[in-house]
Amino acid sequence: MNKPLQKFAGFAAGAMLLAEPVLAAPAAVPNPGNNAWMMTATVLVLLMIIPGLTLFYGGLTRSKNMLSTMTQIGATAALAMLVWVMWGFSLAFGSTQIEGFLGNFFSTGSYFLSGMTAETTAATFTDEVISEYVFVSFQMTFAAITAALILGATAERMKFNAVMMFVPIWLTIVYFPIAHMVWAGDGLLFEAGALDFAGGTVVHINAGVSGLVLAYLLGTRRGYPNEPMPPHSLTMTMVGTGLLWVGWFGFNAGSALEADGFAGLAMINTFVATAAGALTWMVIERAAGHKGSALGFCSGVIAGLVAVTPAAGNSGPFGAILLGIASSAVCYFFVAKVKAKFGYDDSLDAFGIHGIGGIVGAIGTAIVYQPFLGGPGDGSTGIGAQLWIQTEGVLITIAWAGIGTLIAAYIVKIAIGLRVSEETEVDGLDIAEHGERAYN
């Protein structure tokens, strides 16, 4: 064969090889067990809201405002779910629009969940995947409960229509950006190395600080603090506490995104931190000269749950116990001492427990993450460096939530007003706002 023909034959053989189909790697398929666990975890988080949070907060109010409190929580959660599907998911987890801060509403396949099908998947923390609709639903419940938690600070005096106007504005300018910063792969705080397993910053500090800002803007309830305003049904609050604790396993263990060892770690931590928080609060009550109370037990449960949330998969059980103790002690101080000192009316202690407990948990995660306390860290990031990263995340969350809430609240205040009339407050929001009574 002469050289030109030999050269042509070589090209032809190469072309034939290139023309042969290259077998692509098979698409990842969700593990049915992981999918089943994540669907269960999603429903457990819904249990935290309805009936858990509705009973917990409802029991803490006066009887004339119980239905109003419960209705505001339920309607807030429902509205947040719709907003999440319409544009929330794309802003929180869509391709980046504002680098490190926010996703893109107009990114293909994100807005209104367009482009998603039963076959599309979402990544987990390993090579596994879960169904994308399952991931979207799980994260949707986080947005819903965060917005609902704020209402503990505004209970008994914020108008229902003001709540309904505030929620979508607040979600858009506060919650979605913080969720993106902390949990999106290109988020500012995620890339910085901030540890937040299940929402210490995104959920609890965010809701607590936002609630405090609203409480200041609304002013105190009529008669506060001179008139006694005890919970009207600690029985309901206790039932709500139990439902919150049960649902929290979906919140924390579900954040592993798989039914694996880290989900198991988050599960045991959610048991022991909560138990430590509950008992610590009651011990402090006794040390302060009071009787250990049912309300103290419930408050300690929530303080422990809140603190362990960012550390659920980032701590060993011993570290989780320490977090539960520390959170309960600090939250007790803020609820019993600081609130009275500064005179703000955080009606049901949304800031005193969720905001403060979230701060303790987020910063404390840097400590309990370390291997010398049994944490899963490998020691590559020193405790000082991780403390600064965690503190930076807390400070950014506080600033963003505070400023964003001010903007959202003033928009609502100018448009329709925030607070009910004095007559409505005296009569109770149940009958004045909803035409119903909790009890005959």
Image (tube, rainbow, N blue to C red):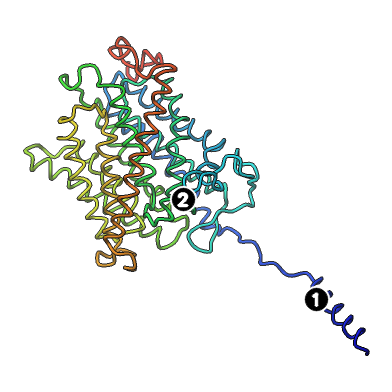
Give the total number of marks visible in the rendering: 2
Label 2 amino acid?
A: Gly
Residue drawn at point x = 36 percent, y = 46 percent: 248
Foreground residue among 28 and 248: 28
Residue drawn at point x = 34 percent, y = 51 percent: 310
Which residue lies under the disc numbered 2? 187
**CA distance for labels 1 and 2:** 43 Å
Q: Tell which circle, 1 or 2, labels the residue nearer the N-terminal end.
A: 1
Horizontal and vertical percent position of residue 74: 43, 29
Q: Quadrant of residue 263?
A: bottom left
Foreground residue among 94 and 120: 94
Which disc, if any, is residue 17?
A: 1
Up the image or down, 123 lies above or below 154; here it is below
Residue drawn at point x = 43 percent, y = 42 percent: 142
Q: Quadrant of residue 7?
A: bottom right
Horizontal and vertical percent position of residue 268: 32, 57
Horizontal and vertical percent position of residue 153: 30, 29
- In screen coordinates, is 87 left or right of 429? right
Label 1 amino acid?
A: Leu
Does dot 2 land on a helix, a strand or a loop? Answer: loop
Horizontal and vertical percent position of residue 241: 30, 39
Which disc, if any, is residue 34?
A: none
**From this viewpoint, which residue is outermost toward the top?**
423
Up the image or down, 22 lies above or below 129; here it is below
Question: Could you tell me which quadrant the C terminus lies in?
Answer: top left
